[in-house]
Amino acid sequence: MKKSLKITYNTIIIILLNIVYYICNYYPKHIIEFSSWKSLFGMFLNFIFYVLFFSIIIIVFKKDKTVFSSNLFNPFLSFKERFEIKLLFRLLSIQIVIDLVYSISSLYLTKYSGFIATVLTLIGWSAFYFVTTHKKQNLTDSKKHFVLTLAICSIFFVISIYFDYKILNSFNTATARYQINSLVL
């Protein structure tokens, strides 16, 4: 399979999987929920999503294949090695730590939880990539690819921070109307 076709398939699969998550759940992406005891079912579904998502990430970055590849799993390897269970649990652990950091920090910095989610999302994606491509050729090997990826991530990060600021500003404007000393009241 051509490399460009492989990249296209993998990009489409990851985007579609994220769209499904955003349709079925709320932002930021998470495994852990603390809303009520009923959230156990939601945590189970989030866990299933992340197992599927990280499995695709492992196929894309570690195995350098697509979900549609014919020789995706080596039948002569053990179950643990074939499905990269150790790496899968490492990625799940990173996501759980990110969820806990977000939950704790959003308790104390409620207004700025959008900014926190943006920063943690970037940290999470970077950690997922570098943990998955550990001891393998990755973006840091080529200066051109590294600078290009860093520039694209920086642009998206700045755009995301800008929209987080706009949302926070409109939230502050809306809540200012309902203060006791507000001119509107």
Image (cartoon, grey):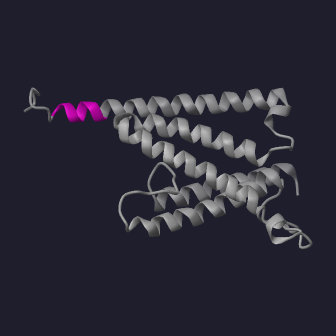
Which percent across, then down, holds residue 113? 41, 38
Quarter of the figure with the N terminus: bottom right
| Left or right relative to 104: residue 56 | right
The stretch of residues the image draws in magenta is 171-177
Q: Looking at this view, is 32 or 75 the one in front?
A: 32
| Left or right relative to 72: residue 118 | left
| Left or right relative to 151: residue 19 | left
Q: Which quarter of the figure has residue 13?
A: bottom right
Q: Is residue 58 magenta?
A: no
Which percent across, then down, holds residue 6? 81, 54
Quarter of the figure with the C terminus: top left
Which residue is rendered at x = 16% and y = 33% of the image? 177
In the current view of this chain or complex, which residue is farthest to the left?
A: 185
Which residue is rendered at x = 64% and y = 43% of the image? 125
Q: Is residue 173 magenta?
A: yes
In the current view of this chain or complex, which residue is farthest to the right?
A: 76
Q: Looking at this view, is 78 or 56 the one in front?
A: 78
Q: Compared to 62, does 181 lie above or below?
A: above
Q: Is residue 77 visible?
A: yes
Q: Is residue 9 visible?
A: no
Number of numbered markers: 0
Which residue is rendered at x = 71% and y = 60% of the image? 55
Which residue is rendered at x = 85% and y = 50% of the image? 3
Which percent across, then down, holds residue 111? 34, 35
Which percent across, then down, holds residue 131? 74, 45
In the current view of this chain or complex, which residue is farthest to the bottom?
A: 75
Q: Compared to 136, does 55 lie above or below?
A: below
| Left or right relative to 18: residue 82 | right
Judged by its main secondary structure, the magenta piece is helix
